[in-house]
Image: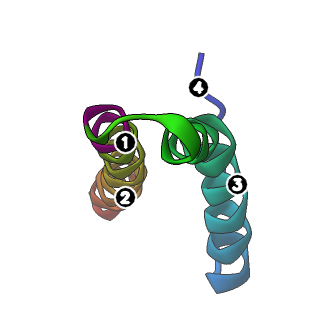
Amino acid sequence: MEDTTTITNRSDFAQWAIERARAIMGEEGADLALAAQGGNEETIRAAGNALGSAISEALLEVFDALLDGAD
């Protein structure tokens, strides 16, 4: 189940973005750091791609919410 956040102003959005970035870095950034310490190129690439995908998904989540709110 997803949490719903109501964003009514720039400050709300900034807070959401900070919390989301922390969550992404906690989930995916740790894997990238571990891969960089001792992994091979493929492991590092996979961890970097996972981090990039998580960031893209978060941005699309916001975009989709903006479209839903415009209706």
Judge whether residue 45 is colored magenta: yes
Q: Which of marks 1 and 2 is nearer the N terminus?
A: 1
Q: Which of 51 and 36 is in front in this view?
A: 36
Which of pointers 1 and 4 indicates the residue nearer the eye? 1
Badge 4 vs badge 3, beta-carbon distance below 8 Å: no
Can see residue 7? no
Residue linked to disc 2: 59
In percent of width and height, residue 43 lies at 35, 32
Query: Considering depth in this image, is 65 or 28 the residue closer to the camera?
Result: 28
Amino acid marked by disc 4: Glu
Q: Distance between the residues labelled 1 and 3?
A: 20 Å
* Residue 60 appears in the rendering: yes
Q: Residue at x 41, y 53 (%)?
A: 55
Q: Mark 4 points at which residue?
A: 2
In the rendering, which numbered label is found on residue 44?
Answer: 1
Q: Which of marks 1 and 3 is nearer the N terminus?
A: 3
Say whether residue 4 is left or right of residue 19. left
Q: In this view, does 53 lie to the left or right of 29?
A: left
Using the rendered view, name the quadrant where residue 62 is placed.
bottom left
